[in-house]
Image: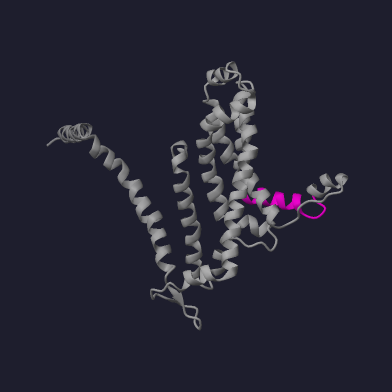
Amino acid sequence: MTTDGTTAVGRGTVRRLAGSLHRRPRLRLTLLLTAPLLWLAVLYLGSLAVLFVSAFWTTDSFTSQVVKVWSTENFHELFTTPVFRQVILRSVGVALAVTVLCAVIAFPVAFYTARVAKPRRRPLLVVAILTPLWASYLVKVYAWRLILSEGGLADWMLAPFGLSGPGFGLPATVLTLTYLWLPYMILPIHTALEQLPANLLDASADLGARAGRTFRSVVLPMVLPSVAAGSVFTFSLSLGDYITVQIVGGKTQLIGNLVYSNIELNLPMAAALGTVPVVVIVLYLLAIRRTGALNSL
């Protein structure tokens, strides 16, 4: 067979294959999703499975070697030791505080960028909101360390009022995490407010509703799913963070710090601690699922 004949046969095969895939959309979709689903199952779900399994192992107290024997000792110690319980509750409290602060700060910012600012300026404002995300995580955290340090910018600004900055500790951790994850809350709210029909606001005003009533009855119900969607990011990212608290948290300990400190000393205990954020986040997702937040992601 000549080269031209071989080329023609190859083209015919490709055409038949393309036609077969065109007539079978389910097969086409399966082939397209095979690679990402394998990646999800093997790398992500597989690593979580290993995490859960290793959490039931123990460590030899003499050699510090992992003993692959099934035991619930780690979880029993996790929920009966006061230090672990305090750290877990503190970590969840920090994540909730960061989420609430982000929502309170993000709403007026998003309202201005979506409804008040001139249309030609809105893209520039969105870019300005996204700009902090382009900077290095460590650069931003160390910048806040300089701001909150003794004699830093926070002390200098509050000195005329007879006050001082929060220093390093739990408030500094919450403040820094709020700054880090604030854009993830602003963007969903901005999108929801931008898509809010103006005639609904006009109709509310025509019916005699004041600004507060319009906000409670019209704006908030329509924007609440987007707030919940943004909270997924702020809550999960804050709950799993451990670098910020090491830099600006002083002696404060969160779950991530305990996981990091136990990786080399007691790997099964680190795995047991690592399951806590996963379980908490799953419960959080189940709690907000009814708000429609997952459809806004």
Task: State the residue in front, 70 or 198.
Answer: 198
Q: Is residue 84 above or below residue 124?
A: below
Question: Residue 167 location in percent, x, y?
Answer: 76, 55
Residue depicted at x 52% and y 40%: 228
Does residue 157 show up? yes
Question: Residue 53 location in percent, x, y?
Answer: 39, 66
Question: Residue 249 location in percent, x, y?
Answer: 68, 58
Residue depicted at x 61% and y 57%: 243
Q: Is residue 284 left or right of residue 150?
A: left
Residue depicted at x 59% and y 46%: 99
Q: Is residue 148 left or right of residue 284?
A: right
Identify the magenta region.
137-152
Is 41 magenta? The answer is no
Task: State the residue in front, 62 or 116.
Answer: 116
Q: How many marks?
A: 0
Q: Is residue 179 left or right of residue 285?
A: right
Q: Is residue 115 left or right of residue 270?
A: right
Q: Is residue 285 above or below residue 130?
A: below
In the picture as drawn, the residue positioned furthest to the front comes out as 208
Does residue 136 show up? no
